[in-house]
Amino acid sequence: MRLTVPEHEVEFTAVRAQGPGGQNVNKVSSAVHLRFDIRASSLPAHVKHKLLAMSDQRITRDGVVVIKAQTARSQEQNKVEAMERLAQMVDEASAIPVPRRPTKPTYGSKQRRLKAKNVRSQVKASRGNERL
């Protein structure tokens, strides 16, 4: 089940993009800052908790996700990219890890390990016998 973030819970701010791009970068505010308040959102409680516990530099101390998208030349494409990145973060937080099932080593693997230990022990023991 994929969780979606409602558009009304996200705040967009248009800013000028950084880096190369000539006159277009200097005059057009095509980059987008996305702000999403985790605590005030309608996400399930366990997802909020996992998001707040993530060690991600895009999450502020106040629990607000700030994503800057500036790869595209149009503001709309940057908004779509920022929403995709936010959805990816939410998916990451909502994923339930598969529990590890402990297994036992097979009889053959135990025998191979013991044989290798014995061989190594013999090699080391043979080194000590060379006295002058």
Image: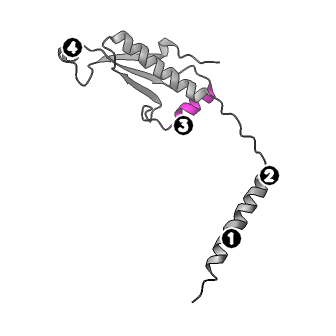
CA separation in Å, label 2 and label 3: 43 Å
Dot 3 corresponds to which residue?
53
Pair 4/1: label in front: 1
Pair 4/2: label in front: 2
CA separation in Å, label 2 and label 1: 20 Å
Circle number at residue 24: 4
Query: First in sequence: mark 1 or mark 3?
Result: 3
CA separation in Å, label 4 and label 3: 39 Å
Q: Foreground residue, 126 or 97?
A: 126
Amino acid type, callout 4: Asn
Q: Which element is circle 1 on? A: helix
CA separation in Å, label 4 and label 1: 72 Å
Q: Residue furthest left?
A: 23
Q: Position of residue 62 (x, y in %)?
A: 45, 33
- Can the viewer see residue 40? no
What residue is shown at x 70% (from left), y 66% (from top)?
Answer: 119
Q: Foreground residue, 85 or 109?
A: 109
Amino acid type, callout 3: Ala
Query: First in sequence: mark 4 or mark 1?
Result: 4
Determine whether label 4 and label 1 are within 8 Å by CB.
no
Amino acid type, callout 2: Gly
Q: Position of residue 89 (x, y in %)?
A: 51, 26
Dot 2 corresponds to which residue?
108
Pair 4/3: label in front: 4
Query: First in sequence: mark 4 or mark 2?
Result: 4
Circle number at residue 52: none
CA separation in Å, label 4 and label 2: 68 Å
